[in-house]
Amino acid sequence: MDAFTPQPRPCWVAGRPEQGEQALEVLHPFDGTEVASVAVPGRDQVERAVAAAAAVAGEFRRTPAHVRAEALLQVSRTLAERAEEIAETITAENGKPLKWAEIEVQRAVNTFRFAAEEARRFTGGLQRLDTDAGGVGRMAIVRHVPRGPVLAVAPFNFPLNLVAHKVAPALAVGAPVIVKPASATPLSALLLGEVLAGTGLPEGAFSVLPVRGKDMDALVRDERLPVISFTGSTKVGWSLMDAAPRKHVVMELGSNAAAIICPDWTDLDHAARRIATFGNYQAGQSCIAVQRVIVDRSRADEFVPKLVQAVGALKTGDPHDPEVEVGPLIDEDNARRVEEWVNMATDVGAKVLLGGKRTGATVEPTVLTDVPKTAKVWTEEIFGPVLVVSVADGVEDAFAQANDSKYGLQAGVFTRDVQVAFEAAAELEVGGVIIGDVPSYRADQMPYGGVKGSGTGREGVRSAMEDFTEERVTVLTGIQL
């Protein structure tokens, strides 16, 4: 922790480092020690950042694609070169075990590389119009044009890569971006601002403003920021929609992701290990962490003990220990909430097969069964290291249980039956179905997003680029085909 002695870290206003009117302390979730302090920009600084983004928008969208691509590639290379430092930063501010922080850095390296590649090939197309008699001699040129500057509101659970998923697509299409990182984890975003500053992007193309959540309203309502990309809680996400009803809002919200063990699945040891790992990675603080485990009755007696054993084998403790797999939650308040929800479930009949206890901000990896379907640990997103096991009578019942949710981000279906796989894709009310694995799988280049209460729009580099742009048509007349 010596590398993180408290010192003010500058915010980035229109690409330049500045001190703020106030300072925000960043605390290590595991033991509450101060990691660093960061500059909180004042109203004048926020105004200058927004004004600069609006002023540069026209120039930036006309920047040649190869220039934007090379800047993104430079970011990717620099992140790779500084991977160890950045991983340590993520663990220090977020509390996730170092092994998971290292994976997050590599994913961010890939996200910027994917964006560099897409920036070179993201284009429109030609559409012949003589398919109708009135269109003879005409052709349409369809281009993708940025909607305008993007307000990127990022969460604490992936403080680098989920920022990357907003910044990289915006810069790839030539849209200025203003990042509002989570107050608990601003360091990774500020470090990314430092990396971006070395690319030579035009002034105003990016800002990183660690304003407090309560002071974000002015950014949300500012008409000069017509696009909002938000990842976070369902409550905050829908409030943004209400506050900015005429803006284009992309939201990745919560979930209580289900993993389904079908009757044909025989490798129960593998499924147990995968579900144990991805129900507890990031201390369960992932929107696609496994929360609900729905196992066919024919497999339950054999599978459940294997799951309990696999969860029990996970090592908890200091996240800087390279062997630790489950670290603390982001703070003690969230850990208390998880503990309370578990206790509420046991009060109405749930059984604790493992865990359920809390020490400070750390909650023991927990497995529950016999949970009433009205309990919060089943209906809400717990965002903690808790697995809830339910038994299903056949595939249709399993799918019905999975769909019995106000959320719909991703689901995992352990089956090798092709017909069941296609049925899952057709019947499950989610944005993504992962066959043969947990719902926690995400490739950074694929479309990613949810339905129902899990949000609107899609991330994934190219998908986000499409979301941040709109089609503009030019019709040429007098064309001989």
Image (spheres, rainbow, N blue to C red):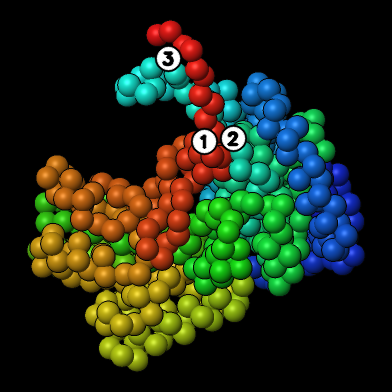
Q: Nearer the viewer, mark 1 or mark 3?
A: 3
Which amino acid lies under the numbered mark 1 shown in the image of this protein? Glu
- Residue 454 visible in the current orientation: yes
Q: Name which of mark 1 and mark 2 comes first in the sequence.
A: 2
Mark 1 Cα within 10 Å, few/some/many (few <14, many 20+)? few
Label number found at residue 145 = 2
> Where residue 341 sits in the image (x, y, percent)?
43, 82
Give the labeled residue for mark 1: 471
> Where residue 320 sits in the image (x, y, percent)?
62, 56
Give the labeled residue for mark 3: 137
- Quadrant housing the C terminus: top left
Q: Residue at x 56, y 63 (%)?
A: 245
Q: Nearer the viewer, mark 2 or mark 3?
A: 3
Instruction: Specify the quadrant of the image occupied by residue 212.
Output: bottom right
- Residue 304 visible in the current orientation: no
Which amino acid lies under the numbered mark 3 shown in the image of this protein? Gly
Q: CA distance from mark 1 to mark 2?
A: 6 Å
- Quadrant housing the N terminus: bottom right
Is the residue 203 above or below the residue 240 in the image?
A: above
> Where residue 328 sits in the image (x, y, percent)?
56, 67
> Where residue 407 sits in the image (x, y, percent)?
37, 65
The local secondary structure at tag 3 comes to loop
Determine whether, in the image, residue 18 is placed left or right of residue 465: right
Instruction: Specify the quadrant of the image occupied by residue 118.
Output: top right
Mark 2 Cα within 10 Å, few/some/many (few <14, many 20+)? many
Q: Name which of mark 1 and mark 3 comes first in the sequence.
A: 3
Q: CA distance from mark 2 to mark 3?
A: 25 Å
The local secondary structure at tag 1 comes to strand
Q: Are marks 1 and 2 in contact (CB under 8 Å)?
A: yes
Mark 3 Cα within 10 Å, few/some/many (few <14, many 20+)? some
Q: CA distance from mark 1 to mark 3?
A: 22 Å
